[in-house]
Amino acid sequence: MFYKNAKIYGSDFKFHHGAFEVKDGVFGAVLPENVPEDAIDLQGATVIPGLVEVHSHGAAGVDFSDGDYEGLKAMAAYYAACGVTSFAPASMTLPYRVLSVAYANAKRLVEENLPGLSVLRGIQMEGPYFSYAKRGAQNADYLKEPDFEGFKALYDGCGGLIRIVDLAPEMPGAAEFAEKASKLCTVSIAHTDSNYDHAKAAIDAGVTHLTHLYNAMPPIHHRNPGVIPACVENENVQAEIIADGYHIHPSSVRLAFTMFKNRMILVSDSGRCAGQPEGTQFDLGGQMAELRGGVAKLVGTETIACSAANLWQCLQNVLSWNIPEEEAIRAATYNPAKALGAEKLVGSIETGKVADFLICSPDYSTKRVFLAGKEI
C-alpha cells in the first residue's frame, strides 16, 4: 500500500514532501520516484514515526510495578491510543521480589505479541540505587547501594528486557556498576546529589543517559557544576525531560534543547493517574499520591510524584513552547528508540523498519495511529 502527498519526517530528521510504502507491516520504499496511481492521497498531512516512551510508570488506573498482567495490557492499549507505538515501562524503587513479578509480566507481553497494543521494547529500572537526599517520590525504605549481582539476576530473569538502569553516581561502587551494566544495557544517572567529579567518573565508566533532567538532581552552579554540565559535555549522553508543563518551566525546556542539541528525549513520567479525574488518590511505590491541579503529589506534601500526561501531550506542549518541530519529533521517536537499543527497528520512517507511524494534522491537534501498518 502506498501513501502520497504527505509531509514525511525522514530518517535524516527533516521533513520531505512525497510518498511512502507499507508492505507486510514494514516500510517499503520511502520517497520513491514512481508512485502508483491508486496511492492513498493524504492531502498534505504530516506523517511522523510512532512515538516511543521510555519513562512511564503507568496510566489508566494501573501501575507497571503492580505486577498485574491485565493491567499492563491496559497500559499498552492506552499508550497506543495516545500515539505511543513502543514503550518501556518504568519500575519504582521496590524490593527485588516485587520487581521480578512486574518484569515477568513484561516478558510475557513481549512473548504474546498481542495486536493493537503498544509494543513493549524494554524496561527502565528506576531505582533502587539512589541517593536518600534526592529520592523524590521514591520509597526510602527500599533504597540500596548499586548491586550488580542483584541487577543481573533481574536482568536474566526477564530475558534481558531491562534496557535502561538508573543509579546515583555518588553511591559506593557506582562507577564499577556502570562499567559492568553498560555492557548489557543503557546506564542512566538519576535521583542523585552527585558532584561533577562523581558524575564524570560514571560517564567515563559507561553512563549514556540522564533521567528526567533537572528533577531530583542538583541545579547548575558556577563553582559546583554537578551532574548536568558533566552530561552536557559528553556527546554520548542523551537526556530525558518531562514536558507535562508542571515539572519544568518552558524556558528551562528550551534551555535543555539548546544544551543537549539533538540528544533530548521527551518523557511523560506518568503514573496510574494519567487519564484519571482530578482528586484521584493512588499508591505509588508504597506511598500515597493524589492528582492535584493537573500533577500528582505525595499526599500531605508538595513533592511531585509523577505526571498525569502522556507523550503525545508532551509533544504538543514542546511544540507550543517553540521547540523546533524537527527537533521535537526526534526527541519523541528516534532518540528514545536509541536509548532502548531499538533504533534499527523503530523510531524513524525508513525502508525495512516496522511501519509504526502517525498521520497528523499540520498543527498536531489530531492524529491517526498505525501499528505495523494497520490503523488502530
Image (spheres, rainbow, N blue to C red):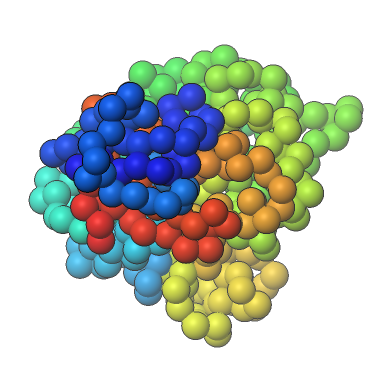
Kindly give the residue lying farthest to the top in the view shown: 204
On screen, residue 1 versus residue 232, left or right, reads left
In depth, the one of 230 and 348 nearer the eye is 348
At a point 28% along the width and 33% down the height, the residue shown is 35
Is 322 left or right of 160, judged from the image as shown?
A: right
Give x and y (percent) for residue 150. Answer: 32, 36
Residue 99: x percent and y percent? 31, 51
| 133 over 185 or under it: above or below | below
Q: Where 65 sits versus 204, above or below?
A: below
Residue 209 appears in the rendering: no
Count of marks placed on residues: 0
The answer to which quarter of the image holds residue 149 is top left
Picture residue at 57% right of the left edge, 15% below the top? 204
Q: Quadrant of the C terminus?
A: bottom left
Q: What residue occupies the far front of the structure in this picture?
A: 37
Instruction: State the image coordinates of residue 307 (x, y, percent, origin top left).
Output: 55, 63
Query: Does residue 77 appear to the left or right of 217 in the view shown?
Result: left
Residue furthest to the right in view is: 223
Is residue 43 among the parts visible in the rendering?
A: yes
Residue at 89% over, 27% down: 223
Residue 55, image x, y percentages: 46, 49
| Residue beneath the point at 46% across and 69% down | 274
In terms of image quadrants, where is residue 116?
A: bottom left
Instruction: Please state, as top left, top right, bottom left or bottom right, where the N terminus lies in the image.
Output: top left
Q: Residue furthest left?
A: 112
Seen from the viewer's position, the closer of residues 362 and 5 is 5
145 to 34, vertically: above or below: below
Q: Is residue 149 left or right of residue 164?
A: left
